[in-house]
Structure formats: C-alpha cells, structure tokens
C-alpha cells in the first residue's frame, strides 16, 4: 500500500524535486536538446504576443522569454502556491494560481498558450485542452508537451522495486497516462491540423552520485512520500544498488532512454 498523503500537491509543494529533475536532464542528456527551444521553435513568436504557460512550475520557460527580450504579457499558471510564488519572482512574469481545467481567463485572451509536461497530471485532460483553446485567440498557437510512455524507465523501475520491498507502490492519483502515444488523438479532438514533433534521447550517468540524486527526485512518483518512515531505507537500498552497478561495470555508463513530443496547433 502507498503512504497516505502522497499526492500531486505534496509533490509540488516544494520546487526542489522538479528543479533536480530539470537540472539532471540539462546536465546528463546523451544528445544536446533543449526542451524550451523545442517549444519556442513551434510558437513563431515576434516578441509582442501575450503568452500563458499552464503548469508553469518555477517559471523558467517564461524567464527564458524575458531573457530573449520578449515584450508582450507573460503569465505563468500553476495550482501549486510554491510554483506560483517562484514564477512570480521572475521580473516581467505574472504568476497566477489556477487550475488547468478551469482557467481564470477570458475567451481569446492570449496569442500563445503552452502546457509543458503537465497534462499527465490533470484529472480531465480533454477539458484542459478545451480550456487552452478557449483562452487562445483564433490564429493563435497552442503547444503541448508530454513524455513517451516509458521515459527514464530503468531508473524509475529500480526505485519502484526497492519501494515495493517496503510495501510501497506508486500512487494512482499522480499521473493519468497521457503520453506521446495518446496525446495526438486527444489533441485532434480539440484542434485541427495538429503537428507532432518527436524528440528521442537518453539520460547518461558515468558516476553514481548524480544518478542517486535523480532517483531520489522520482521518489514520490514511485510511492515514497517525503515523510514516509521508509524513505531513508529505500534511499539507502537504491544508493547501494547504484554504487554496486558502477563498481561492477567499470568504464560503462548507466543509460536510460527518454523522450517527448511537442504537439502544436493553430486555433481556428
Ligand atoms: C512536471 S511539472 C512541469 C513544470 C513545467 N511546465 C516544466 O516543464 O518545467 C508539472 C507542473 O504542473 C503543475 N500542475 C499539476 N496539475 C495542475 C493543474 N491541474 N493545473 C495547473 N497546474 C498543474 C504542477 O504543480 C507542476 O508545477
């Protein structure tokens, strides 16, 4: 049985695990590939558009737009107060507490709308897609990113196996199964002419420490809550296993395939 209290809101009550995962992807990807640019490339921004990023996390996507000199309105929406507070500290970005299924904006309020790596957390993803369409003006663009069905599965399975040894299993309320296989059809039910851009990559580790750090940042998705009495024991077991793997595979890297799609549409 999973620990009680293991929910999306507990996972995103702090920005730290998300930041560790993003940092790991930036440092340990096999091929250079920046997911921010992958989305930006599809948005065709001129610099003056009103942009809403739904499920904005700590606001780093919008921070990049500020850095690139974007002059239009930039709004980051998240249902975690910690994330909204972080986004709000970015000069030029408006952090808004809100739910993807019921966005606090008028019809056609934005020129560009993004939902990056968040749709798999939403209870009714079809409704969230219709909300993206509602708040985006005709002729405006929507971009949605989600992972491949199995992404970083090797590391995740290692954690899940050790968690199971302590009677812990992944909580079902953390993810809804929307992935790169299912999203294109869902998008086509809401938008016309959906374009799909697919990115395949892998995480690569040549030492144990950053892999252990990444594995711990996956704990809540593997059934281990922050305050679980078993957290320390699972971490010790995962660390031992990872260190043993590197000791018995000198000169080899731990490779864990991953990938995502960017699905885009122009609102009619
Ligand atoms: C995996 S993180 C991705 C953050 C950011 N988009 C990125 O790519 O770095 C998912 C984010 O979606 C937010 N989130 C989850 N469910 C949400 C919902 N129903 N409405 C708004 N935000 C939500 C979480 O709080 C979290 O910040």
Image (spheres, rainbow, N blue to C red):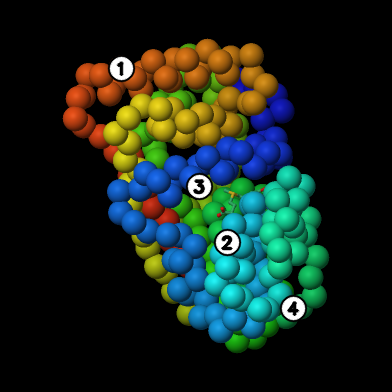
Task: Confirm or deny contact between disc 4 and disc 3 (CB under 8 A).
Answer: no
Q: Name the residue under label 4.
A: 109
> Disc 1 and disc 4: Cα gap in Å?
54 Å
Of the numbered discs 2 and 1, the one sitting upstream in the chain is: 2
Q: Which of marks 4 and 3 is in front?
A: 3
Task: Confirm or deny contact between disc 2 and disc 1 (CB under 8 A).
Answer: no
User: Image point 63% across, 26% down: which residue?
Assistant: 225
Of the numbered discs 3 and 1, the one sitting upstream in the chain is: 3
Looking at the image, residue 120 sits to the left or right of residue 32; the answer is right
Q: Mark 1 points at which residue?
A: 244
Q: Name the residue under label 2.
A: 61
User: Image point 22% across, 19% down: which residue?
Assistant: 248
Q: Where is residue 9 in the image (x, y as percent from the top left)?
A: 71, 40
Quadrant location, the C terminus: bottom right
Q: Is residue 36 visible?
A: yes
> Disc 4 and disc 2: Cα gap in Å?
20 Å
Please rate how many residues cluster around mark 2, counting C-alpha atoms within 10 Å: few if below 14, some from 14 to 19, many from 20: many
């Amino acid at each position: 049985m999973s620990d009680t209290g293991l929910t999306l809101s507990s996972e995103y009550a702090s920005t730290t695990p998300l930041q560790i995962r993003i940092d790991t992807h930036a440092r340990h990807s096999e091929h250079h590939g920046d997911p921010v640019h992958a989305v930006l490339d599809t948005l065709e921004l001129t610099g003056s558009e009103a942009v809403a990023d739904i499920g904005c996390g700590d606001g780093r996507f919008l921070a990049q737009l500020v850095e690139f000199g974007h002059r239009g309105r930039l709004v980051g929406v998240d249902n975690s107060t910690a994330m909204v507070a972080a986004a709000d500290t970015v000069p030029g970005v408006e952090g808004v507490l809100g739910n993807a299924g019921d966005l606090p904006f008028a019809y056609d309020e934005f020129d560009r709308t993004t939902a990056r790596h968040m749709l798999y957390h939403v209870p009714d993803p079809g409704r969230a897609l219709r909300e993206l369409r509602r708040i985006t003006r005709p002729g405006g663009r929507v971009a949605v990113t989600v992972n491949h069905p199995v992404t970083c599965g090797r590391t995740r399975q290692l954690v899940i196996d050790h968690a199971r040894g302590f009677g812990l299993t992944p909580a079902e309320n953390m993810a809804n199964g929307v992935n790169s296989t299912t999203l294109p059809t869902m998008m086509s039910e809401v938008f016309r002419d959906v374009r799909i851009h697919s990115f395949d990559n892998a995480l690569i580790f040549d030492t144990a420490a950053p892999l252990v750090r990444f594995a711990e940042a996956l704990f809540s998705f593997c059934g281990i809550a922050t305050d679980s009495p078993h957290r320390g024991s699972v971490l010790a077991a995962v660390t031992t296993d990872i260190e043993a793997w590197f000791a018995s595979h000198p000169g080899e890297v731990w490779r864990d395939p991953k990938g995502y799609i960017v699905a885009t549409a122009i609102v009619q």
